[in-house]
Image (spheres, rainbow, N blue to C red):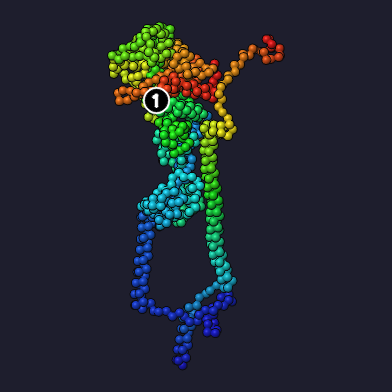
Amino acid sequence: MRVKDGFFYATNSGNREKVSKKPKKRRSGKDPILKYRSSMLLVIFLLIFLALIGRLIQVQAINYQKYAAYGEAELTHKIELPGMRGTIYDRNGNILAISIPAPTIVADPYQITDPTKEAEVLSPVVGIGVSQLISLLSMKAGFVYIAREISQSLAQKIMSLHLLGISEIQESKRVYPDPEITASFLGNVNADQTGISGLELQLNSLLKGKSGLAIVDKSPTGADLPGGYKVVIPSHQGQSIVLSIDSSLQWEVEQLLANDVLSTNAKDAFATIEDPKTGAILAMASVVVVSKAPENKNLIIAQSGNKYVVPDTVNLPVIDVFEPGSVMKVATMAGALTFNLVNPQSVLNIPSQLMVGGWAFHDAESHGDIQMSVTQILAQSSNIGTIEIAQMLGAQRLYEFLRKFGFGKPTSLAFPGESPGLLPPPALWSGSTIGSMPIGQAEGVTQLQIVNAYSVIADSGIMMPLHLIDGIVQPDGSIKKVAWGPGTRVISKSVDSELINMFEQVVKNGTGVEAVVPGYVVAGKTGTAQIPKNGGYIPGAFMATFVGFLPAGNAALVGAVTVDRPNNFYGGSAAAPVFSQIMQYAVTHFQIAPGD
Amino acid sequence: MSTPVRQRAIKSQKLKKELNQLKVIQGKKERNLTVLIYGLVVFIIFATLFVTVLGHALVAEQQIKIDNLNAQVSKLEQTHQSLTVKLAQAKAPSKIEQKATQLYNMAPPSTIIFLQASPVKKGSSGSGQGASNP
């Protein structure tokens, strides 16, 4: 070490470095004021540090969940993933109902600083009034629906406005591609995609999907952060179902019913077509005449002047209970043949009128005392002859046979709102009931019950369970057929073949000649009944019904047509021709050969 | 005499004090090496940070691409669904008949003719040895 130029130089390994010559001037540590100040400063810093540590412990260890939740809420947004409702197909794979994703525009009013300005921009696009939008956007809520289940293009248009607090979420929307043919039996779903009527309600547990949950990370400006989308709970689609309905037949039936109600000036009409061998319902249509055009023009089936025929939102074949008239004679005939009280050739004396319980019963066409065979009684629909046979059978056995044929109880269809009809037990019968019951005047039935009863005759005396569901679509796309179980024998085969021959005569030379289908042997029965009201009957108001099946010996189809208050009020003239037209279409559509 | 001695003693004391304040430092090479090492460490830290940020940016970029692809998939699925509905609507019997009657002047058949196939005799169509009833 040496001194040069007023600096000390430290030497180490020959290197030199300039260092300050003057030693630092230090204040004495013994300065009491400095010592006091230093101590105070130290204490203050220590206190501040301790306070910070305390706060850190409070935030990070004690209340961490609360603050973590705050942070999470600022960053993440929960999104409900809609569980799509299952699709409903017809028997040929045509879509009858399907759910599709539908954008919904929602608002977070807490984020909106100027509701009036946003409402003015939004109003012309969404088509909601400015005042209504202002009240929606000013609500004290974090979530408000602005427009639900709108089109993709409209959603894009709204989102392109880049309005603060307005966002798009995905919901699902139920679409019925052909509402004209499905409105009566499919029913509807509400905004939450829950079935509220018809098959949508009945099959809700199968069709309804399970909603999922996703979390999206967003920036403070509301933009999605890349990779911030996480599906927490995946959504599941509901099961898809294949119905036994045939869309083409359904539409044809509706067309024919619509033409009929217009030509006969009827109030409404309904029809059911069934495959008696399986119990599958192939068509079930209800049409009604309205004087005002519906908003959805697709629903208009036929039009004449200011009369519009549209599908009835009520599934009339299942729900409408009416006095059936002569179609009920089936139970009396089946009972009498089963107990060998008569045979088809047995001849009975038919007086011009028959007094039962103080009431006079007549035939539709007046006559003197005549003789008729049992077959003729059925073919000509003689009320008096049928009552005589019913009296032989007795009230209890008649009641039992009516029950056996499915009257007075719901069918296996279990359709929502299905009526069991009205069939009082013999204990409640008056003296005249044994006269009115066999001719279909003291009971109330649904058309479905009538079809169900005649399917027994059509299918060799066996009643198959009525059903609308053919199968359930499996995850791999295959269809698992629903097993509907074996049928129930109602009458013997021999009685059945006797009845078939008798019902053939109704169409060959009885009241149902207009039900004839060229080339086919048709069996069936007409029914004409007055419409009851307030303990009496509406004058001139009739329910006209025809029920039949073909080819008679080995029936492939059974169907019923009912026309409510037609001007040509007989079942044989108002309903039978429509039955014939429906069946002419059906036999070609299903390629049913006459000899089958 | 005493004064120079005293002065010398004082000087010596001062020198001792100053000597105490001196410290040994590294040579230039070593110090350069140290600076280099420190510089390298700082560089590595910054480089690591840069690479990390770059990696994040690349991941984010790819994620944006994935998100965009997912959005496209979702959009195409929606298009598929709406086309499915349109197809179902087009297949509706009412639409088919409307097209057939209005566009192609077709009409429902007025009569149905069924042809009865005559029973075929066994072997009648054959020409080989087995044809016993030609």
Q: What is the x, y in percent for residue A446? A: 39, 24
The amino acid type of the residue labelled 1 equals: Arg
| In the image: residue B127, left or right of residue A349 | right
Q: Which sits in the foreground, A337 or A358?
A: A358
Q: Residue furthest bottom?
A: B1
Where residue A372 sits in the image (x, y, percent)?
A: 41, 8
Q: Quadrant of the N terminus of chain A?
A: bottom right
**Image point 42% across, 27% down: which residue?**
A265
Near-viewer residue (B32 or A174): A174
Between A329 and B59, the one nearer to me in the picture: A329
Q: Is residue A241 visible?
A: no
In the displayed structure, would residue A288 be above or below residue A106? above
Residue A561: give x, y in percent of width and height: 44, 23
Residue reaching furthest to the right = B128
Asked if residue A558 is positioned above or below residue B132 in the image, the reply reads below
Seen in the image, is B111 located left or right of residue A243? right
B104 shown above or below B21: above
Residue A15 visible in the current orientation: yes
Asked whether, in this view, residue B56 is left or right of residue A347, the answer is right
> Residue at the spot x=44%, y=27% of the render?
A261
How many residues crowd around disc 1 within 10 Å: few (fewer than 14), some, or many (20 or more)? many
Q: Which residue is mark 1?
A: A565
Chain ID of residue with mark 1 = A
Residue at horizontal 50 percent and vertical 81 percent from the top:
A21
Numbered disc total = 1
Quarter occupied by residue A191: top left
Q: Whole-percent x and y of residue A543?
A: 39, 23
Q: Along the line of sight, which residue is nearer the eye, A88 or A592?
A: A592
- Check disc 1 and report its element: helix, strand or loop: loop
The residue shown at (53%, 58%) is B53
